[in-house]
Structures are given as structure tokens and as C-alpha cells.
Image (spheres, rainbow, N blue to C red):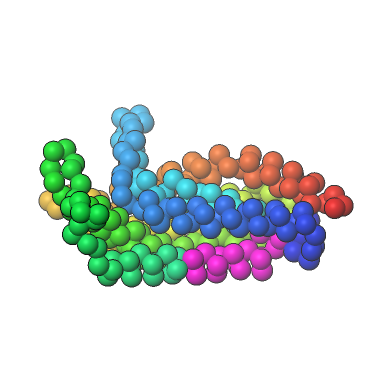
Amino acid sequence: MDFSNHNNSRSNLVFLILSGFFLGSLTLLNVLGTSRFLDYSFNLFNIEIPFVIAIGVLPYPITFLCTDLISELFGKKQANRVVWMGLILNIWVLFFVWISGYLNSPELINGVPNVSIVDGEVIPRDYAFYQIRKLTMGATFASMIAYLSAQFIDVHVFHFLKEKTKGKKLWLRNNVSTIFSQLIDSIAVILITHYFVNGLPLDENGKLTHSLIYFIISGYIFKLIVALIDTLPFYWLTHVLTKYMSKEN
């Protein structure tokens, strides 16, 4: 059922919550970015499966779950609007992170040196800020391009399959749209992060192509696993939210 033309408090509240989770998760993943990497590589039948992911990728699947729910409940037009709002938010975050680096910081704050002590070593308090700023700007720039490509593909494939299956096989359009869009996102964000931002911990003595493929496969495996896991929440939330919005105020 399409609630895009419903103008009641219940449908407005659901749309606001889904949009809020989408935009909040999008901002969070850019702030976390490539500040840390997690290595959960494992062996399967004596074959090493790479599973090294940036911590910023953790909230990313939530954005696709939200856009799929918005697509299902409110239509393609509303889903695209939220995607565009996400791009605007990315630019907004990028602007403030960029301009904040040009504001002067005093050497003394209330007569106290503007420094921090880390492991017995005295470092400027601004050091942590500029490290976060560098990583955040890099992650935001990379995700902006990858984000636009992946999210629009997700919405397009979702509605293409919805039309082809005449509104049936919810699991098919949810998984296929996410699988395609996540592949595009994984490739784009890794290549952009390396070639334009130099934000990946790569072995200088190793083969570049192999290292990049390693990161792409790792991120994609994580996203595929989450895509399969979120099928049940997607079904459940679609049912619950449809029932909730169908009731009179």
C-alpha cells in the first residue's frame, strides 16, 4: 500500500522517523569513516576470507533499510527526496568540518596550555581534532559520490522489481536492490577513498590491486550478510507500519 498521498499524523510520524534514522546513520558513518578498521578475517575450507572493514560501514546498512521501507510505504518519489536530502546533509557536514579547521585556537585556555597528555606524551589538543577532520572530510567526500550512485540504484531497482512482480515477492526486491546497490557502493567508496583521499591502510610493498580488491570484498561481504539478515526486519516493519498507518487518527 502506498501512503505517499496520505496526510495524517501517523504516516507523517513514520516518514519522519524513517528519514531521521536514515539521515542520522548517514552522518554517523561519515564521522566514524575510516578512523578505525576491524579485522574479522576467517578461514573457510582452508580458504582465507578477507573481512577487514572500516568502522564507518557499521551504520551504513541502516540507510538502505530505511530507503527500502520509504520506497515500499511512500513510493519512489519520496525515497528519492530523502536521498537528495542526504546529499545536502553530506555537503552541510563537509562545509562545517572544512571551515572549522581555519578557525584559530588559542595557545592558552583560562591560563592553561592547550595541550593533552597521551601515554605520557604532550601533544597539542588540536591534534585529535585535525586527525578527525582529515578522516571525516575524506570519508564524506568519498561517500557523497558512492552514496548518490548506490542509493539511486537501490531505489530504481527496488521499484523496477516491484512493477515486474506486481507488488509481490517483497523479499526479492529488498535483497536484489540492496545487493546491486551495495556492490556499487563498495567499489566506489574504496576506490575514491584511496585515489582521492589516501585514507586506506595499504601495504606499500604489496600489490595495490590485490589490496583494493581485499577491502572491496571485505566491505561487500559485510553488506551482503546484513542485507540477508535485514529481510525479516524489513518484512516485519513493513507489516507493522502498514497496519499502524492504516488506522484512523
| Above or below 72: residue 5 | below
Answer with left or right where residue 238 lies relative to residue 36.
right
Whether 195 is among the magenta residues is no
The dominant secondary structure in magenta is helix
Whether 78 is among the magenta residues is yes
Q: Residue at x 39, y 54 (%)?
A: 31
Q: Is residue 48 visible?
A: yes
Give 139 or 65, whichever is nearer the viewer.
139
Give 51 or 77, whichever is nearer the viewer.
77
- Which corner quadrant of the image does residue 75 belong to? bottom right
Provide residue 54's location: percent of width, then percent of height: 35, 47
Q: As drawn, which residue projects farthest toward the right?
A: 248
Q: Is residue 173 visible?
A: no
Tell me which segment is drawn in magenta: 71-89
Q: As drawn, which residue projects farthest toward the top?
A: 45
Provide residue 248's location: percent of width, then percent of height: 87, 52
| Above or below 223: residue 105 | below
Q: Residue at x 12, y 51 (%)?
A: 205
Provide residue 189's location: percent of width, then percent of height: 37, 59
Quadrant for the N terminus in the image: bottom right
Provide residue 164's location: percent of width, then percent of height: 70, 60
Q: As drawn, which residue projects farthest toward the front?
A: 111
Answer with left or right where residue 209 lies relative to residue 85.
left
